[in-house]
Image: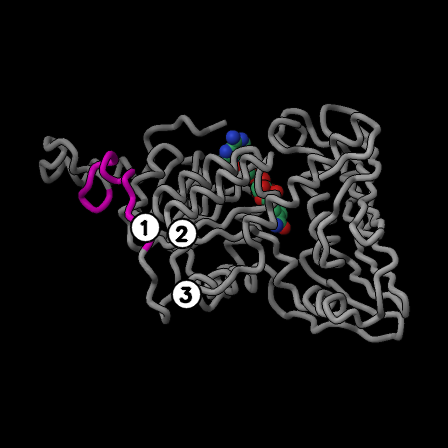
Amino acid sequence: MKETITTTRRRFLRQSAAAATGLLLAPGIIGCGGKSAATATAAAPASAPEKNRKLGIALLGLGSYAKGQIAPSLQFTQHCQLAGIITGSPEKIPEWQSSYGIKDENVYTYDNLEEIADNPEIDVIYVITPTATHKDFAVRAAKAGKHVWCEKPMAMTPQDCQAIIDACAENNVRLSIGYRMLHEPNTQSLIELTKQQAYGKITEATAEAGYAGSDPPTDYWRGQRAMGGGALYDMGVYTVNGLRYGTQMSPLAVLEARQERPTEVDVTTEYVLEYANGLRARGWTSVVEDNNRLRIEAERGWYELSPLQSYGGVKGETSDGKLLGPAISGKQQTLQMDNDALAILNDSPVRAPGSMGKDDIRVIRAVIESAETGKRVVI
Ligand code: NAD
């Protein structure tokens, strides 16, 4: 962990400037916008942004997803701009500043994150850190008066998810979970088929999300149970969420589950969900084996997404030969962030609210309990 760093390039720059003008001698005026960190923590609720301006996004956590997908996707958004970064790794700061023109005053560390409350150029904090850290970072972001986008899976427990939901409500900021598939057009078309019961009542549903990687190393968070590692949290959440949008129902119970755990985390998990109308759905997820699809069987035919959750190439098909589409030219994450920004600008509902993220974590916990006890577990 690198969160204990207290001196950053930004703080250094700010203090140098302050020292040059003699301000360093005056207590309490070094913080951003001329206020001290103490006053910054008592954040005012986020004011409604002007509708025709781009929202300023600050990325919290500059790991592989932030660097490889989110930051590049932000460059193509219409309603967002990458305005700030919040990191525990100061050595990453120069590269990010030069790649994206991020100003010194928009660079924060995990230690001085609260000072962002006074920064009018930041509207949203996007939490992209290991799953077990989402709760604390998201709650701090909300308390700083910034809208919160939180990566999947939302948090470790339903209680942690609720803490995020409560913090956002109390601070009058919006919350959205980074379920990019809910912004993908083939996926939206499949959801419409279910909503319209286009092929009659659903008789079977299967969701699979896995890739043929190797066992996650135990010195990395993806190999650590307490950090949210393992197949079920990381990849399985796509199957849990896929079955939710694919059936448009919430499961009542986990009928049975099985986990393969060579170390402290699962590398493959299988489970069966039960629904109020008697439907049983199967989920499968793995970080050591390939498979990726969502298939819905109904009374008069089937429809599916294959792959279910890849970054590109998602294809929807039906039993009568229809392709769902449309294909997208850009990145799913660009659509996701523009939709989430519009929800803030227009004060309209988000596609992936905190309640959905929490419901999925309840299912994940029940799958684990069922695998460990060998029993049916009511969700
Ligand atoms: P990563 O390991 O590449 O990066 C994690 C980042 O968090 C690093 O910069 C690390 O320094 C930082 N960090 C902050 N606190 C930390 C702590 N206590 N321990 C370790 N690192 C800490 O991981 P990633 O692949 O970027 O994943 C980050 C989040 O994004 C996860 O929640 C993951 O599920 C999610 N994610 C989502 C998608 C998607 O398609 N929606 C894809 C990949 C990852």
**Amino acid at pointer 3:** Leu
- Check residue 345 in the rendering and tell me which mark sits there, or answer none: 3
**Amino acid at pointer 1:** Pro
Of 299 and 227, nearer the camera is 299
Mark 2 secondary-structure assignment: loop
Q: Which residue sits at x=56%, y=46%?
A: 151
- Check residue 45 in the rendering and tell me which mark sits there, or answer none: 1
Q: Which residue sits at x=81%, y=54%?
A: 277
State the extent of the magenta-drawn residues as a range.
32-46
Label 2 near label 1: C-beta < 8 Å? yes
Of 70 and 176, nearer the camera is 176
**Amino acid at pointer 2:** Val
Query: In terms of image quadrants, where is residue 111?
Result: top left
Q: CA distance from mark 1 to mark 2?
A: 7 Å
Q: Which residue sits at x=60%, y=34%?
A: 157
Question: Mark 2 near ligand 1 (CB under 8 Å)?
Answer: no
Label 2 near label 3: C-beta < 8 Å? no
